[in-house]
């Protein structure tokens, strides 16, 4: 993954594409189609296009490759990595599951 300039996920269907999270954790900007949770994962750090729109996908890939040639590349790489650390870390997942179960227990006590 670390050898990539960009990661492209041109899916027609996804739920939670872990490969995108893995690429971003390595600081690799992503070009994805807007299916499943891809838009939420990528946020403002990459490019999101409509599924089944080859022209838009090609344009986003060109834009991403142009970005790789500029100093903006390092800022984008850092943003990708920080987004994964802040939004998709194991500690965040554990905290959110804990909150979910605590809420479920509280609701159960009220019933």
Image (cartoon, grey):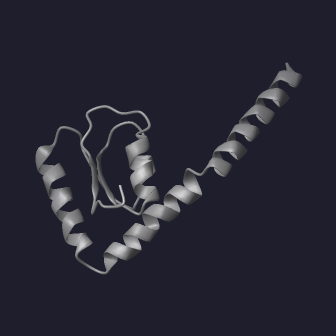
Residue ID at (19%, 57%) = 61
- The percent position of residue 106, horizontal first and vertical second, equals 84, 30
Residue ID at (46%, 57%) = 25
Residue ID at (14%, 53%) = 58
Please state, as top left, top right, bottom left or bottom right, where the N terminus lies in the image: bottom left
Residue ID at (19%, 70%) = 66
- In the orientation shown, which residue stands out farthest toward the bottom? 71
Left or right: residue 87 versus residue 64 is right
Please state, as top left, top right, bottom left or bottom right, where the C terminus lies in the image: top right
- In the orientation shown, which residue stands out farthest toward the right? 109
Left or right: residue 62 versus residue 13 is left
- The percent position of residue 4, horizontal first and vertical second, equals 29, 59
- In the orientation shown, which residue stands out farthest toward the left? 55
Which one is in front, 40 or 98? 98
- The percent position of residue 46, horizontal first and vertical second, equals 34, 59
Q: How many marks?
A: 0
Which one is in front, 19 or 87? 19
- The percent position of residue 72, horizontal first and vertical second, equals 32, 77
């Amino acid at each position: 993954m670390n050898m990539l300039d960009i990661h492209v996920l041109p899916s027609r269907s996804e739920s939670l594409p872990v490969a995108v999270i893995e690429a971003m954790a390595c600081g690799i900007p992503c070009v994805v189609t807007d299916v499943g949770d891809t838009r939420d994962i990528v946020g403002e750090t990459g490019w999101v296009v409509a599924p089944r729109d080859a022209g838009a996908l090609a344009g986003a890939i060109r834009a991403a490759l142009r970005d790789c040639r500029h100093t903006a590349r390092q800022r984008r790489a850092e943003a990708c990595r920080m987004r994964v650390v802040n939004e998709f870390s194991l500690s965040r997942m554990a905290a959110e599951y804990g909150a979910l179960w605590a809420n479920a227990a509280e609701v159960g006590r009220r019933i």
